[in-house]
Amino acid sequence: MDDVMFPRFGVVVVAPGGDAERAVRSLLRQSTPAARITVVTATAGGAPGGKADRGVRTVGCAPEELGAACVEAALATDAEYVAFLDGGDEALPDWLWHLSRAAHHGAGDAGEPVGLLQCGVLRLRADGLVDGTALPPATPGTRPVPADLADGVHAVRRDLLGPGKDEAAVAVTVPLLLVRRRAGGSNVAVHAPGARVIRGSRPTRGTPRPAADRRPRDGSAPELVSVVIPVRNGARTLGAQLRALAGQTATVPWEVLVVDNGSTDATRQVAEGARGMLPGLRVVDASGRAGESCARNRGIAEAKGDFVAFCDADDVAHPGWLAALAEAAKEAHVVGGSLETELLSPGHGDEQPLPMDAQTDFLPFARGANCAAWKDVLSVIGGWNEHYRGGGEDMDLSWRAHLCGYRVAYAAEARMHYRLRDELSSLARQKWNYGKSGAQLYAEYRHAGYQRRRARTVVMNWCWLLVHVPDLARSPLLRRRWVRYGARLAGFLAGSLRRGVGYL
């Protein structure tokens, strides 16, 4: 279908202090150009009129008239819809493309035109790393109000902004992260023009799953791959991983960064001693803050390569691991490899992690122990989320990439020999953390389609746990299985209480 058949959008950028460069720059790079871009600023004198630069019109008003000036600027455009941004926002290249199609396809049951559109926001810290996501509710019957949009972005049908227009509007959500917003961004004037439309909206079902990615790779290979290994007190196993990396068959140039996250054992000495077989190896200090995500982000910042691969210090890479990741990088933005437990943890086949192409709960994700991504993509999506501790950070990274429109692919040939936890206390702690992060992920991504388990399944799981309590005394294998399940279910419960959600 030709693009001219889809509604056009004007954009009003609200910049009280006058700084709208970040938003304007992102709007000029849209794959579907805006019909008109207007920047509204607040000036002490409330200067009337405006000026144009790069086709962008700027108008000034008194600070107390900012909301009214936004409405006036929206009504002045000839587009059918008007979207609103804060001056510090960055719209991803396909923002207007997605809004236009949602407006075209999202009419109500009676065929009414869409009056309100909402999309998600990727919140960033001042240093550009991810702080979280804000996705609008997509459940029919959930009425959005201005307070719900404090972190969101919306667009309205222009004719609903006119005086005396109080008709109910069909509201549609686009469950994608289409706008980046740094800490301190957004102001109440951004939401003022659509406040009445928001209060009178009638939500319809949002898109249940994100649309297919709009940004395919161009087929180019990485120029340099940076392999990042986060480690804390890993002297016992790090040497085997470094020897495995020295035996890689990849022909692409690559480097290794051992990111020390505050080790107190001989980790650094082991890493330094591997320079003979890995001449490009560097040891990076990341002792300032504990956490794998913190260490990985430090590695990204120090990486010289345009493509960054991640593995763990207690695993062993297959000789073809890096070559397979580099090959998959030609067609994907984020790549996940496969994990195999038989070599390092024989006899535990029931704990083999599911491959990406078998994941069915939500969007497929690349596991942190074996994944890679283009460095510029990691920059756009904000790197690893340091709010996740002990699990879930890999799902969060992949899902953010999906929701920003990037392609997350599976490379089964990129094999990593994966080590399971031996001690029951360590295993229980790991599964407990996984359970807690599951509730955290649900709280963050439920509006994008991530669903909790059915009540019947929850009841059956807890009943199984109670019935199998005797397994704790029967055999080490059965005891291990009970601890795995029990710790995870307990983590679900603890995470639900902490996050205020029912993810059991």
Image (cartoon, rainbow, N blue to C red):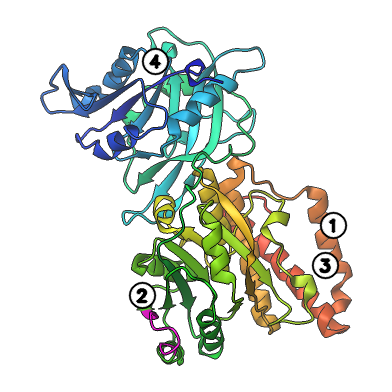
- Up/down of 16 relative to 336, above or below: above
Dot 4 or dot 2: first in sequence order is: 4
| Residue designated by label 4 | 79
Q: From the image, which quarter does the N terminus lie in?
A: top right
| Residue designated by label 1 | 460
What's the amino acid at mark 4? Ala
View extreme (top): residue: 164
Which callout, 2 or 3, points to the residue nearer the camera?
A: 2
In the rendered structure, which segment of residues is drawn in magenta? Answer: 274-283
- Up/down of 449 relative to 162, above or below: below
Q: Secondary structure at mark 2?
A: loop
Q: Is residue 489 at all visible to an observer of this figure?
A: yes
Dot 1 or dot 3: first in sequence order is: 1
Instruction: Tell me the residue at 35%/65% (across/down).
Output: 301
Question: Crowding near pointer 4: few (<14 within 10 Å), some, many (20+)?
Answer: some
Left or right, residue 33 beside residue 39: right
Question: Crowding near pointer 2: few (<14 within 10 Å), some, many (20+)?
Answer: few
Provide residue 119's location: percent of width, then percent of height.
Answer: 49, 34
Q: Secondary structure at mark 3?
A: helix
| Residue designated by label 2 | 288
The CA span between labels 1 and 2 is 44 Å
Dot 2 or dot 3: first in sequence order is: 2
> Which sits in the foreground, 201 or 270?
270
Left or right, residue 11 beside residue 326: left
| Residue designated by label 3 | 465
The CA span between labels 4 and 1 is 54 Å
What's the amino acid at mark 3? Leu
What's the amino acid at mark 2? Gly
Residue 347 sits inside the magenta stretch: no
Please identify the quarter of the rendering in which residue 438 is found. Answer: bottom right
